[in-house]
Each structure stands twice: as C-alpha cells, then as structure tokens.
Image (cartoon, rainbow, N blue to C red):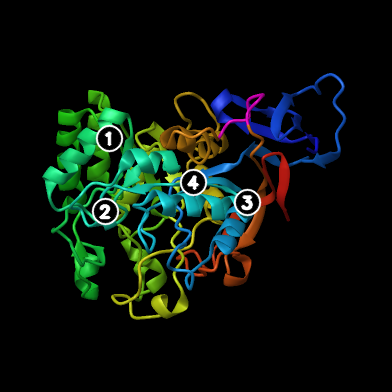
C-alpha cells in the first residue's frame, strides 16, 4: 500500500471538531496521523494542499446509479466517475432499479459490480415491499446480510397503511432504519409542480404541501406505535419541517434530509416551462425554500443529498408535463452546499462553527451518521476517504463539465464555487484534476 502525506491543507473534519491548518498522513489505506508524522513515516507521495480544504469524502444519501435496468440513462462506470469528480466517496442508492432491489442476489451483484470499479463505496437501500408494490414485505434480514443499510419505497408510496405498520414493526424488531419520502398516495398524485399561484397561472397540475404533511402525520403516529427508526427523505416544505421539529423535540427517533437544489430554487425557477426544473418533490415557494435553509442551520435537517437522478435527452427534452422528473447532482453537491454556506455566512451559528465547516458537516459526518455507515470522519485509524477542494475556485455548470451521463440540471449555466482537486478512496488517489 502507498503512503501519502497531504501537507499545508486546511483540514475540516466536523466529526472530530477539527477546523485548522493540519497535515494529514495516510498509510495502509487509513489515516495514520494528523499534524505530525508518525515515527518512521516515509511518504511515497506528497500532495501539497496549500490554499485548499482537506475534508472527509462526501457522503451522498440519494444517488441513482441507474443500474441494473436503466443503462441507457447512465451506467455504474459513468456515475461513479461523476461521484469521484464531485468528491463523493460514499453514496446511498435507492431501490428503484429494474429489477427492483428486493432480492439478495440483486444487491450482491450491484455491490460486486460497484466494487470492481474501484471508485466510490456504494451502499444500497433494499426495497421495503416486493417490487415496491406496497403489498408484501421483503426479506429484510436477508437483504441486510447482502449489504443493504436500510429499506425504502423510493417514489412509490404505500397505499395500505397496515402494510407500512407491519413493515415498521418488523424493522424495529431487528433495528433496521426505514427510509421514507413522505407523500400521500392520493393527494397530488400525478401533479408536476408545487400547488400555488404559479402552477395555476402556468396550467400545471399541482402537488400541495399537505401531500407531505398528511404523510408525516401518519408516519409519526406509526413511529409512536412501533418505536421504529425512520429517515425522511427530501423534505420540501416549511410546514413539513415544523412537524419534524416537533417530532424531534418529542424524542421520536427520526432524521431527515433535503435535496441540495431545494435549498436554492423555488417554483418560480420553472420559468417558461424549463423541463430541467422538473424534479420530485417539486420546487416549492420562496417561503418553503427559506424554511429549508433555516432548518439546515438549526439542525432540524440532518443532511443534504444530491438526489442524483440522471435522465437522458429523450425523456428530458419534452414539454414540462411530459418530461421525466430528475436532475443530475453528484458533481454539484459540494458546490451547492458551499453556496448555502456563503448565502448564510452572515448568520453566525449558535455553536460558533464557521459556515464552511457547517456545510462540510451536512455532506460528510452528518450524512454518515444518518446512514449508519463508517464514513465522514478523518480520525486516526479511519479509512482514508478524502476530498481535497478549492473553496474559492469557480466553475460553470455545463454538459461538458459533467462526467455523469445525465446532463440535465436546473443549474446549467450557473457559475458556482468549489472545485474538487483530488478525491482519495481507501488511501489511493482515485481522481485528480
């Protein structure tokens, strides 16, 4: 194994409270020392990180890799390369592949295929119900053995609440986490934009905020009854965040994330029916967007994810209502998290942590804690999964700048700061710009 010395970098490791100029020493794929070299350490490679930030590799809580089944939209190879370019070293993939991840063999195959790429670590979510049909439960114990870190329904809500109750009882018995995106199975079904004056004016069918809040009320009642641990995916509304804040204050074992683009855009960004702004859940009002930003700051929202959903041209370059929802995000996660920190730089957080460190925490240690995986920390002895980035360097989002096979994002043409200079996985430099 190679030894590596990253020198002169600004080390930000929120998990261990480090935010200072520190050297990092890596041996045998793990962090060997911080600050001073361990006895007898000889570096095979020295990386000068002067002016750069050295942080744990990013942990993305929702990235669709489109394999198996949707290789025409993206492949493991293209999306894991995109992950490295975005500084992402661990990612969680939802079960809505084709076939659905409801059999241990499929999960093992995906894990094996991902491992042979020697890129980012892939952590699959198993399907909560067979075929995501919301009727019969999957063999959660077998799926966990195969490598699933939790169970989800992706974008398919369970219509029969009894099934969800049973699923949560079962998950609680074995200590599994259920990942749910709160949406009522009926209200707002088929809707394509946030219910409000803008959707009415554009003649677009709406998804009201109560689709999210009604589902949250149901989930919290089931949590009280079962004690199950739930992670809520991609919250989109201020009203939803209020309910989560209350549930956390009550002591329910709940965490939540937001798609990073929801911290910046609103339904007004649909503009003249821009299909790139067609996402699930839809962009909501400015008040909702501001509530998301504030909830990230006060800790109600645990993490930001890219909600990476590559879509090909045939499904995106269509009228707004017919276009497939989804946006490419793996390579934007870091920059958009930094943009949230910049926008909030004037708001000093209660702990006095700097905005940059807060942003890094939301996409590293906080996300890893939610997923229950060993990542997002640079403590001595931990795996050396590292992102080295220039927080001040700017880049323009364009199809040619994205490694992902999906080239569609509402941020096309935006200039963002935060350029990844190197991504290190297991002590090996996996990507260098």
In what element is the residue under mark 1?
helix
* Labels 4 & 3 near each other (Cβ < 8 A): no
As displayed, is residue 217 above or below residue 95?
above
Q: Which of the two labelled residues, at mark 2 and mark 4, occupies the earlier sequence position?
A: 2
Considering the image in quadrants, where does the C terminus appear?
bottom right
- The x, y position of residue 427, in whole percent, is 71, 39
The majority secondary structure of the magenta stretch comes to loop
In what element is the residue under mark 4?
helix
Q: Which residues make up the magenta segment?
A: 376-382
Classify mark 1: residues with Cα within 10 Å, few (<14), some (14-19) or many (20+): many
Q: Is residue 428 visible?
A: yes
Name which quarter of the figure residue 230 lies in: top left
Residue beneath disc 1: 171
- The x, y position of residue 39, in whole percent, is 84, 19
As displayed, is residue 155 above or below residue 34?
below
Q: Which of the two labelled residues, at mark 2 and mark 3, occupies the earlier sequence position?
A: 3
Residue beneath disc 2: 130
Q: Which of the two labelled residues, at mark 4 and mark 3, occupies the earlier sequence position?
A: 3
**Is 74 placed left or right of 153 in the picture?**
right
- Give the distance between the C-alpha atoms of the residues marked 2 and 1, in whole angstroms: 15 Å
């Amino acid at each position: 194994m190679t030894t590596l010395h990253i020198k002169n970098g600004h080390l930000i490791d929120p998990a261990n409270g480090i935010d200072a100029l520190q050297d990092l020493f890596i041996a045998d794929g793990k962090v060997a020392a911080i600050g001073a070299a361990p006895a007898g350490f000889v570096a095979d490679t020295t990386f000068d990180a002067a002016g750069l930030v050295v942080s744990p590799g990013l942990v993305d809580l929702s990235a669709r890799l489109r394999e198996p089944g949707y290789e025409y939209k993206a492949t493991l190879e293209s999306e894991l390369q995109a992950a490295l370019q975005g500084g992402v070293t661990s990612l969680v993939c939802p079960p809505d592949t084709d076939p659905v991840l409801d059999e241990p063999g499929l999960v093992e195959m995906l894990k094996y295929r991902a491992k042979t790429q020697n890129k980012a670590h892939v952590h699959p979510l198993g399907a909560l119900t067979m075929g995501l049909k919301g009727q019969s439960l999957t063999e959660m114990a077998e799926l966990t053995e195969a490598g699933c870190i939790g169970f989800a329904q992706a974008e398919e809500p369970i219509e029969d609440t009894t099934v969800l109750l049973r699923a949560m009882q079962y998950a609680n018995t074995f200590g599994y986490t259920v990942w749910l995106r709160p949406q009522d199975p009926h209200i707002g079904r088929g809707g394509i934009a946030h219910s409000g004056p803008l959707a009415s004016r554009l003649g677009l069918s709406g998804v009201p905020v109560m689709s999210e809040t009604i589902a949250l009320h149901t989930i919290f009642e089931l949590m009280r009854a079962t004690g199950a641990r739930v992670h809520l995916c991609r919250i989109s509304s201020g009203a939803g965040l209020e309910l989560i804040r209350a549930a956390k204050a009550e002591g329910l074992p709940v965490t939540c994330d937001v798609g990073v683009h929801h911290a910046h855009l609103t339904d007004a960004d649909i503009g003249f029916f821009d299909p790139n702004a067609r996402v699930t859940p839809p962009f909501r009002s400015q008040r909702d967007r501001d509530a998301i930003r504030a909830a990230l700051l006060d800790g109600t929202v645990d993490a930001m994810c890219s909600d990476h959903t590559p879509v090909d041209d045939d499904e995106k370059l269509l009228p707004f209502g017919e276009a497939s929802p989804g946006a490419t995000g793996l390579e934007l996660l870091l920059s958009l998290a930094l943009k949230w920190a910049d926008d909030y730089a004037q708001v000093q957080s209660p702990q006095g942590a700097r905005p940059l460190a807060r942003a890094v925490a939301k996409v590293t240690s906080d996300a890893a804690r939610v997923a229950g995986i060993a990542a997002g920390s640079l403590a001595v002895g931990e795996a050396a999964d590292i992102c080295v980035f220039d927080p001040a360097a700017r880049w323009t989002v364009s199809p040619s700048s994205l490694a992902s096979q999906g080239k569609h994002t509402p941020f096309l043409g935006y200039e963002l700061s935060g350029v990844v200079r190197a991504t290190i996985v297991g002590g090996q430099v996996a990507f260098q710009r």
